[in-house]
Structures are given as C-alpha cells and as structure tokens.
C-alpha cells in the first residue's frame, strides 16, 4: 500500500519539501562536479578487481546519486495523491502527470552519462 506521507504532506502544507530537497541535492551535486579540483593520481597498488572503489570522486558521485534517487522516489511515492487531493486532478490524469518525472529520468539518464564521459 501507499505510505501515509501524502496525507501528512498535504495536511501540513509541506508538499513542496521533497521536490525542493531533490532540486537542492541535484544543485549541490552539479556544483560539486563543476568545482571539483583534480588531484594527482594515487599510486597504483594491488587494489584488486575494483580499483575505482578507492577513488574519492567515485564515492562523491555515488553519494550524490543516492541522495537524488532517494528524493526522487520519495516524491514519486505521493505525487499523484497530491495532484488528486490538492489540485483536483482525476486519478488517471494524476498518474499520467506523475509518470512524467520517471519517464524523463529514463530518457535523460543515458544522455547525462554520455555528457559525463566527455
């Protein structure tokens, strides 16, 4: 079943909080990526099959992705209920509008990966 987040968010008037958190986390990750200073490469050691796990940048990207994904999933969990309750959408239309965010993520994620690889 759905969590009780939607009724609580609508009742408290804090509907925009998860969306603001998602935008804020994304902005922080973009600022971090834009201002990242290159460091000299670490000396090569016997790192095993996954040497990238020792790199600080990998963990920065992993943490930013985790926060963005968590905020996005939180928003997706109750966005259709907010559209129905607060804005008067019917259920099928609210579901279609709420589906735009994950659909856009599916389309834009590979493009973001291509841009990151440049």
Image (cartoon, rainbow, N blue to C red):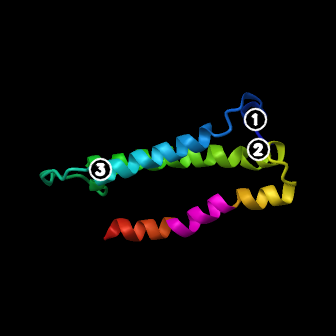
Seen in the picture, residue 117 relative to 69 is either above or below; the reply is below
Magenta residues, as a range?
Answer: 100-108
Which numbered tag is attached to residue 10?
Answer: 1
Which numbered tag is attached to residue 82?
Answer: 2
Seen in the picture, residue 9 relative to 49 is either above or below; the reply is above
Mark 2 Cα within 10 Å, few/some/many (few <14, many 20+)? many
Local secondary structure at mark 3: helix
In front: mark 1 or mark 3?
A: 1
Q: Which residue is mark 3?
A: 57
Q: Main secondary structure of the magenta part?
A: helix
Mark 1 Cα within 10 Å, few/some/many (few <14, many 20+)? some
Mark with earlier residue (1, 3): 1
The answer to whether the residue labelled 2 contacts the one labelled 1, judged by CB atoms less than 8 Å apart, is yes
The answer to whether the residue labelled 2 contacts the one labelled 3, judged by CB atoms less than 8 Å apart, is no
x, y percentage for residue 52? 29, 55
Local secondary structure at mark 1: helix
x, y percentage for residue 51? 26, 55
Furthest residue in direction top, as rendered? 12
For the C terminus, the quadrant is bottom left
Residue in the picture at 48% in, 69% down: 110
Mark with earlier residue (2, 3): 3
Q: Is residue 28 left or right of residue 74?
A: left
């Amino acid at each position: 079943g759905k969590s009780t987040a939607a009724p609580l968010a609508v009742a408290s008037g804090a509907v925009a909080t998860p969306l603001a958190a998602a935008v804020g986390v994304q902005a922080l990750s973009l600022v971090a990526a834009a201002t990242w200073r290159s460091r000299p490469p670490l000396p090569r050691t016997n790192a095993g099959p996954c040497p990238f796990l020792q790199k600080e940048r990998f963990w920065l990207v992993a943490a930013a992705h985790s926060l963005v994904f968590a905020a996005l999933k939180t928003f997706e969990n109750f966005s259709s209920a907010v559209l129905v309750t607060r804005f008067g959408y019917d259920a099928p239309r609210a579901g279609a509008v709420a589906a735009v965010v994950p659909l856009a993520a599916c389309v834009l994620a590979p493009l973001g990966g291509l841009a990151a690889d440049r």
